[in-house]
Image (spheres, grey):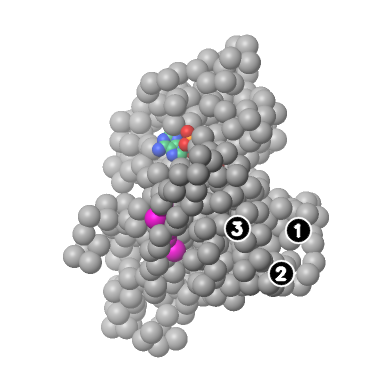
């Protein structure tokens, strides 16, 4: 802890994992002897760099860039870039640490990393975003490559930013190294279905949990937070499976649409116009916008937190349980606080942690890397059916580990222990490095 003083989010994510590993470690004194835990919590490499750029009025601006290469025991470092004013080393380290376990659960032979910047893309022109991305890549180029470290998107980094980053990488290196970034446009090396993968995957996972408990998402009221990439496609898949997604949010508030979110309108407002969520209520009759409080004040059968870390706390969890929530699947990374998780589990609510439930995005990114390496391109049906298969496998592996370590249905224990054993075994076999 002394090395990570003040890194609240990182320490929270480490505690959340270590607190569940007692039964695994009891069976594996070899992991302790080999110093696996001490090595696991220390990133292999951490980079912090200056990102200077000029805004549209020719003023020089400076942001801070990060790339944390956390663990490469299973494969090259892999994980997204986040552009948001709240980004700092603690946030990037927590995301990188989570990524180790998530990537292991996908069985896709990818290590873990994460990066980003405290740059705020909101309200910036395309030209400003481009200049920022180009400057960011001037440094990142020295540390990434299709066999070393493969960044992707996250909050504030979507297809537009990946395009600018890839263009600059290609220009500096003078190579068309398709596999160096994932989340590319489908016309130039991107995988069909990558945009939808995280949201779809989270709903597939929720559906697996519900089916194991004897029902499906069909006919249920589903609460979704966020209105970005993950939230949008979670809403899409919920509606395809016969559920009714009735909420969406952004940092200004949330909307409720009892008839079910109009996906085309949501996409027009958030993806095309990049406007605020309140706009939705103005254009859709029967829906309303709430500027205060939280989406978790609404009653629902299933909750899918898809915005950001620590957005669902104990009092939200209490309200959801009182409203009869049956399942919670985390589309975002660490959206539920530890006391919120405890409350759900004590109330018998099915609870899927992000490292299992949102693994579909990075899994599809790994499929994008495979297609780039083979210079091939799969169609949408094949991509989605592979994603569905992977999410079923992640659910199975997670459930099996929860049984094996004595708490059937505890998906937190299941995800942490199954992933930990995979990574720890690889680290053990590769020696003290
Ligand atoms: P986007 O940038 O596309 O969307 C983020 C959404 O969350 C926006 O609606 C944003 O609102 C909202 N949000 C962000 N911060 C806050 C906040 N502090 N309070 C309230 N709302 C907030 O990001 P993604 O959809 O890609 O990512 C969402 C989550 O999913 C993150 O936790 C990310 O790490 C995780 N994730 C993403 C993956 C992916 O493939 N993209 C893969 C796995 C996990 P506003 O616009 O107002 O900021």
State which quadrant residue 366 falls in.
Answer: bottom right
Neighbourhood count class around disc 3 (C-alpha, 10 Å): few under 14, some 14–19, many 20 upward = many
Q: Which residue is mark 2?
A: 176
Please report the residue visible at 75 percent of the width from the left and 53 percent of the height from the top. Answer: 186
The magenta-colored residue range is 63-67
* Magenta segment includes 98: no
Q: Of the residues tagged 1 and 2, which is closer to the observer?
A: 2
Q: Horizontal and vertical percent for residue 148?
A: 55, 75
Secondary structure beneath dot 2 equals loop
Residue 129 visible in the current orientation:
yes
Please report the residue visible at 27 percent of the width from the left and 52 percent of the height from the top. Answer: 8
Q: Horizontal and vertical percent for residue 123?
A: 51, 35
Q: Which residue is mark 1?
A: 188
| Residue at the limit of the structure toward the front, as seen here | 58
* Label 1–label 3 contact, CB within 8 A: no
Q: Which residue is mark 3?
A: 165
State which quadrant residue 394 falls in.
Answer: bottom right
């Amino acid at each position: 802890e002394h090395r990570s003083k003040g890194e609240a989010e990182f320490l929270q994510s480490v505690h959340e994992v270590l607190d569940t590993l007692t039964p695994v470690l009891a069976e594996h004194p070899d992991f302790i002897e080999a110093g696996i835990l001490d090595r696991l919590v220390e990133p292999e490499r951490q980079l912090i760099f200056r990102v200077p750029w000029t805004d549209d009025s020719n003023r020089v601006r400076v942001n801070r860039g990060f790339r944390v290469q956390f663990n490469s025991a299973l494969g090259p470092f892999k994980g997204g870039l986040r552009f948001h004013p709240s980004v700092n080393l603690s946030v990037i380290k927590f995301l990188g640490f989570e990524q180790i376990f998530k990537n292991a659960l996908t069985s896709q032979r990818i290590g873990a990393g994460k990066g980003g910047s405290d740059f705020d893309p909101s309200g910036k022109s395309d030209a400003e975003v481009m200049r920022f991305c180009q400057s960011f890549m001037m440094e990142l180029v020295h540390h990434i490559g299709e066999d070393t470290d493969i960044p992707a998107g996250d909050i504030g980094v979507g297809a537009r930013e990946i395009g600018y980053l890839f263009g600059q990488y290609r220009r500096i290196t003078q190579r068309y190294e398709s596999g160096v970034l994932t989340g590319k446009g489908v016309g130039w090396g991107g995988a069909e279905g990558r945009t939808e993968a995280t949201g779809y995957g989270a709903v597939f996972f929720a559906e697996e949990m519900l089916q194991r408990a004897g029902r499906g998402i069909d006919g249920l009221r589903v609460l979704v937070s966020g209105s970005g990439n993950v939230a949008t496609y979670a809403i899409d898949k919920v509606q395809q499976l016969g559920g009714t997604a009735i909420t969406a949010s952004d940092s200004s508030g949330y909307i409720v649409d009892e008839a079910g979110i109009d996906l085309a309108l949501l996409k027009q407002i958030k993806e095309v116009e990049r406007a605020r969520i309140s706009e939705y209520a103005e254009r859709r009759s029967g829906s309303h916008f709430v500027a205060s409080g939280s989406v978790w004040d609404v009653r629902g059968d299933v909750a899918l937190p898809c915005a950001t870390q620590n957005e669902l706390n104990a009092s939200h969890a209490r309200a959801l349980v009182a409203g009869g929530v049956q399942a919670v699947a985390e589309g975002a990374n660490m959206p539920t606080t530890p006391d919120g998780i405890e409350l759900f589990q004590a109330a018998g609510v099915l609870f899927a942690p992000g490292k299992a439930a949102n693994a579909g995005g990075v899994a599809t990114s790994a499929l994008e890397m495979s297609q780039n390496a083979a210079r091939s391109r799969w169609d949408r049906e094949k991509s989605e059916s592979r994603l569905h298969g992977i999410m079923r496998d992640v659910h199975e592996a997670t459930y099996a580990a929860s049984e094996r370590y004595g708490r059937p249905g505890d998906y937190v224990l299941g995800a942490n222990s199954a992933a930990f054993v995979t990574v720890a075994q690889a680290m053990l076999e590769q020696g003290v490095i």
